[in-house]
Amino acid sequence: MNKYIYSYHIISTDEKSRFGVPASSQEEADAGIREAIADIEFTEPEDVQSITFDSVIKETDNYFECEGCT
């Protein structure tokens, strides 16, 4: 599973930011990104505009270590 990064604009607050969503394909990420951003920003999906795909972080590009191993 990869992480797909998007830029977006919140109309009501004029905020511009980026958000990443984990998904198995870009199509899957595209399908749920507006709702995911609205949820994290505590706003309505209609308030989220100018969503553009920025990049993908491949699963193999990450290293995870449990708390006990650090």
Image (cartoon, grey):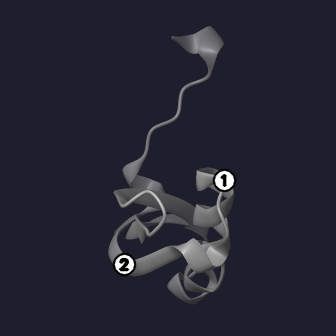
Pair 1/2: label in front = 1
Looking at the rendered structure, the number of numbered marks drawn on it comes to 2
> As displayed, is residue 9 above or below residue 18?
below
Say which element carries label 2.
Answer: strand
Front residue of this view, candidates 54 and 67: 54
State the residue lying farthest toward the bottom. 27
Instruction: Inspect the image, locate mark 1, and give the three-letter code of the amino acid beneath it.
Output: Phe
Q: Name the residue under label 2.
A: 53
| Residue 43: percent from left, percent from top | 64, 61
Q: Is residue 70 left or right of residue 9?
A: right
Q: In this view, does 46 lie above or below 59?
A: below
Which residue appears farthest toward the front when viewing the image? Answer: 12
Disc 1 to disc 2, C-alpha distance: 21 Å
Looking at marks 1 and 2 on the same chain, the residue that comes earlier in the sequence is marked by 1
* Amino acid on which the number 2 mark rests in the picture: Phe
User: Label 1 belongs to which residue?
Assistant: 42
Can the viewer see residue 67 in this picture?
yes
Viewer-closest of 14 and 69: 14
